[in-house]
Image (cartoon, grey):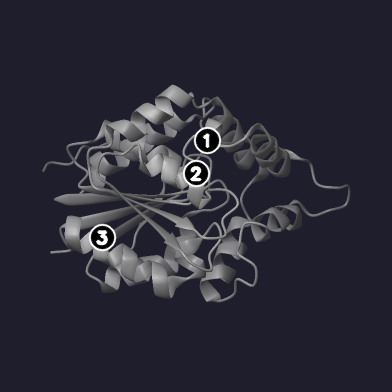
């Protein structure tokens, strides 16, 4: 399929071979670098991988009109320009909220989707949970506190108790570097994304979709993700044990085989 020549957000092509590309979309706290271990595992399984810095993150400039639709359109342009015969969109947390909207823009190019640890849409949380979500991510740090240290406290609270390992350390290292302005813009986008649009996008997902929650995730918790999974006609749902908000990093022994089995059934590496 011919690729369009369009401006792209900065991204990393870590393996430019094979007929199936997996696109990795990070969350509110993050950047393309925290996907390195999962990228390695996917490449070893024969997949081509592209991890991006979403608009406003890492090396990508934040647009003045930052919204989920703007970010989804940037992702769609990326797939139109770099996609292979088969493409998979893997969205984590905020990236998982954006994934259905992105897939809807390039439905003819996407073979499957993976969504981890997402709230799905803001109204999928209680008013108390919504208030806590916003407060912890937008409260200014105490005077004299390094913003990175303040962000690390939020990030640490999203892991399961006792989460350790190189993958977890990398998530902490990368996520704490997220520009606070980008975090606040993303939180506003979460709040502003209309429930009917979010629900409609999940219901319109026509590709096989794997949704994975961490058993101890307080953000994209299993109950909320089950409600989201029920909206997608071709969904599969799983809970990874001993995991919080980053199941692909916290329990790789359980998550990686789950992911690879789904991909082999619906988007084989070839």
Secondary structure beneath dot 1 equals: helix
Q: Which mark is residue 262?
A: 3
Q: Nearer the viewer, mark 3 or mark 2?
A: 2
Q: Residues within 10 Å of mark 3 (few under 14, many from 20)?
A: some
Q: Quadrant of residue 248?
A: bottom left
Image quarter (top left, top right, bottom left or bottom right) of the C terminus: bottom left
| Mark 3–mark 2 distance (CA, rounded to whole Å) | 21 Å
Vertical arrangement, residue 211 with respect to residue 189, above or below: below
For residue 150, say whether it is visible.
Answer: yes
Instruction: State left or right for residue 128 relative to residue 119.
Output: right
Q: What is the total number of numbered labels drawn onto the structure image?
A: 3
Q: Do callouts 1 and 2 mark residues in contact (Cβ within 8 Å)?
A: yes
Q: Nearer the viewer, residue 81 or 155?
A: 155
In the image, farthest residue toward the right: 143
Q: Which sits earlier in the primary sequence, circle 1 or circle 2?
A: 1
For residue 84, say whether it is visible.
Answer: no
Residue of label 1? 124
Q: Residue at x 49, y 67 (%)?
A: 241
Q: Quadrant of residue 133?
A: top right
Q: Which sits earlier in the primary sequence, circle 3 or circle 1?
A: 1
Vertical arrangement, residue 113 with respect to residue 261, above or below: above
Residue of label 2? 224
x and y, in percent, of residue 122 in the image:
54, 33
Q: Do callouts 3 and 1 mark residues in contact (Cβ within 8 Å)?
A: no
Q: Residue at x 46, y 48 (%)?
A: 53
Q: Residue at x 43, y 70 (%)?
A: 37
Q: Which sits earlier in the primary sequence, circle 3 or circle 2?
A: 2
Q: Nearer the viewer, residue 255 or 151?
A: 255
């Amino acid at each position: 399929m011919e690729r369009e020549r369009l401006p792209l957000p900065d991204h990393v092509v870590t393996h430019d071979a094979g007929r199936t590309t997996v696109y990795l979309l990070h969350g509110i706290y993050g950047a393309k670098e925290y996907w390195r271990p999962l990228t390695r595992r996917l490449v070893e399984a024969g997949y081509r991988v592209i991890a991006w810095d979403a608009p406003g993150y890492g090396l990508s400039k934040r647009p003045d009109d930052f919204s989920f639709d703007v970010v989804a359109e940037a992702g769609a342009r990326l797939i139109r320009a770099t996609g292979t015969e088969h493409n998979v969109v893997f969205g984590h947390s905020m990236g998982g909220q954006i994934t259905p909207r992105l897939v809807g823009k390039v439905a003819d190019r996407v073979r499957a989707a993976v969504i981890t640890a997402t709230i799905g849409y803001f109204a999928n949380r209680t008013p108390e949970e919504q208030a806590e979500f916003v407060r912890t991510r937008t409260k200014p740090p105490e005077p004299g506190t390094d913003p990175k240290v303040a962000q690390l406290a939020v990030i640490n609270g999203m892991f399961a108790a006792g989460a350790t390992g190189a993958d977890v350390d990398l998530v902490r290292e990368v996520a704490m570097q997220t520009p606070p302005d980008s975090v606040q813009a993303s939180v506003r986008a979460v709040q502003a994304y209309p429930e009917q649009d979010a629900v409609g996008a999940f219901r319109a997902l026509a590709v096989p979709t794997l949704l994975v929650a961490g058993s101890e995730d307080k953000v994209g918790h299993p109950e909320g993700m089950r409600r989201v999974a029920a909206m997608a006609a071709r969904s599969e749902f799983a809970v990874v044990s001993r995991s919080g908000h980053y199941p692909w990093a916290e329990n790789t022994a359980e998550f990686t085989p789950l992911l690879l089995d789904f991909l082999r059934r619906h988007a084989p590496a070839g």
